[in-house]
Image (spheres, grey):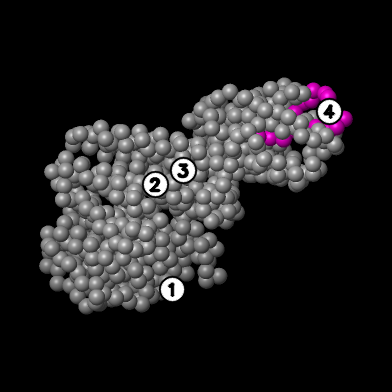
Amino acid sequence: MSFFDIEKSSANNYFHSMKDQFQRLVYGRSEEVFAAGDAARDKITNMKQLEERRKLIRKTFISSIGGLPSMNTPLKSKVVGSIQEKGFRIEKIIYEPRPNALVTANLYIPDGLRKPTGAVLFVCGHNQQAKHASEYQIVCRHLVNAGLIVLAQDPIGQGELFSYYEKALKNTTVNWGTGEHDHVGAQCVVLGDSIARYFVHDAMRGIDYLSSRPEVDAKRIGVTGNSGGGTQTSMMMMEDPRIAAAAPATFIMNRRTYMYSGGAQDAEQIWPGMTAKGFDHEDILLPMCPKPVCVLAVTYDFFPIEGTRQTVERCRRFWELSGKAGNLEIVEDTSKHAYTPKLARAAARFFSQHLLDKEINVNSDAIEAIEPSKLWCTPSGQVKEDRTGIRFVFEENQDRLSEFEALRKNYPVERGKESALRWLKEQILFNRRPTNLNPRFWKSREEEFCVENGYWWSQKEVINEGVLFRNFRFAEKKLPVTLAVWNGGTTAIRQHLGWLRKTCESGRAVLVLNVTGVGGSEPNPLNAVAPHAPYGVMHKLNDDLMWLGDSICAMRAYDVLRTLEALRQWPGVDAKDLRVYAHGAQGVYAELATAVEPGLGSIELHEEFEGFGAWVKARHYDVYGSRSLLLPGVLRHLDLPDLRKWRGKHYLKN
């Protein structure tokens, strides 16, 4: 058997199907909490219970995304230009939701207003041009033609707000929209935040701006948007009680049907731990009850229409319970994912009814978009081309990191260490379901190396595997053992062959471990994307785990802990003399495990992951496989340099 054969052999496990075990675990545990959430909502029979659920949703959501920045900073809003159109004008607005952070927006104002009137915040989906995209202009023009004031604002990474725009390049170094959201959003995760906190905050400050305008009746403000704008609308429905009416478009579904669609979601659409609390999209609608809500949907969406219909139908009884059954409706269009003219007409009719007390039906035929650049709030169409010193989420993350590093530094050393390690152990053990190892060991080759394969249960539903090497001269001896944890596990043995030979020749056995999702347990693809690439199956399953309050990083650290137990049962191995060899970024799983389990002995690091804090400080990084390193909230408690310092003599660095 060649080393090529050894690297491939882990996929040929004949006693247990490993390729889909990770998916089965994630989906199975999600199904359990989906059912628990349905049961909890089914128990609501009166308005008092509904109010309790509303409070729980808001509290849980805001905690999930890391809280909100201050709402008390000056907006410093400016009107930087104006366009007169037939029947309305469009003002170009710039305001500061947070100091030195900007939002660029267009304010549509009907002509002839004589008193404060109803307004709608339009939040944009994942369109590069955002507020000045033709599709979104047309929606805003439907609304203003109905007599509504409309504030359409650019979201992070879109429109005029490309965070990674470089003036020297006249281009971005990280792709606009979801590429940018995921790039910096992943860095938010290890800070215990979600990039959603900034989307919500920007939108809430948009409501602040509308409320400050004399033309607007602050008690009659609605919100709408589709796709990513549907996400923002949904978050506002849960969080901002000032919203008088809402029309979330092409987003409302349910978590279960989307899980089975096989797609990952964007960073601002991941709310860690919410599924574990029984949350589903019904809990987006419930906080609005009995206020008016119009769910807008398309039948050919990648957000499953079946889930949309189910969610709306299950929520009807709450509006009936409140005596406002007519305030919940759903409008569908036969279309692909878009805010279609039919949905725009429905939104105009809905908001004019509930915010203006009028029945207005807007004719779409005469509505056309204008040249997008006419709506720019900056001369070039990019804030970073025309302004300096503007802050985006990356810069906000640096402040959050400094805040948490200062807090950690101020802890008494021993108490801080004890608290941090207790937290880390809780993350690693969270929601694990231990079971007997029931190991299987057998020899598969005897040449230069004596090679043995092993399989054991890491937890219920999850098999781990590894390959044990020993030099042929020590074939019959009981040997001390080194546990090797590196990127790719047994699929990358040849890259480490020199070290492997040297270690085995010294009289030690080496176990090369495949953690969950590596080697024979790498999941089958769920979409057309490579498994470890952005939006591939590992990205998708890790997002589902984070919804459950878990992570691949914590699960794999648990795998390392269980491997210690497996080695204690491995014939011909002396697990009392155990060392750990961690190489590359995925060596972090071994670092985390050895921090909470002294029995794992010393650890030697090579080309190690520098630390979570250092990664947050990196403006650019390799995104491939990076989501498997995310340990949510870790920087509020510790960083890898802390673990290395605490480990002392048990930490060896190449």
Closer to the chain start, of discs 3 and 2, is 2
Residue 466 inside the magenta-drawn segment: yes
Closer to the chain start, of discs 3 and 1, is 1
Foreground of the two, 431 or 409: 431
Question: Predominant secondary structure in magenta?
Answer: strand
* Residue 465 seen from this side: yes
Tell me the amino acid under the disc marked 4: Ala
The x, y position of residue 545, in whole percent, is: 48, 40
Foreground of the two, 93 or 634: 634
For the residues labelled 3 and 2, say whether their Cβ atoms are less than 8 Å apart: no
Foreground of the two, 634 or 123: 123
Dot 2 corresponds to which residue? Answer: 257
Q: Find residue 10 and report its image quarter.
A: top right
Q: In which quarter of the image is the N terminus?
A: top right
Q: Is residue 464 above or below residue 623?
A: above
Dot 3 corresponds to which residue? Answer: 544
Dot 1 corresponds to which residue? Answer: 380
Point out which mark residue 475 bears.
Answer: 4
Tell me the amino acid under the disc marked 2: Thr
Q: Find residue 554 and report its image quarter.
A: top right
Tell me the amino acid under the disc marked 3: Asp
Between marks 1 and 2, how big is the CA–CA gap?
42 Å
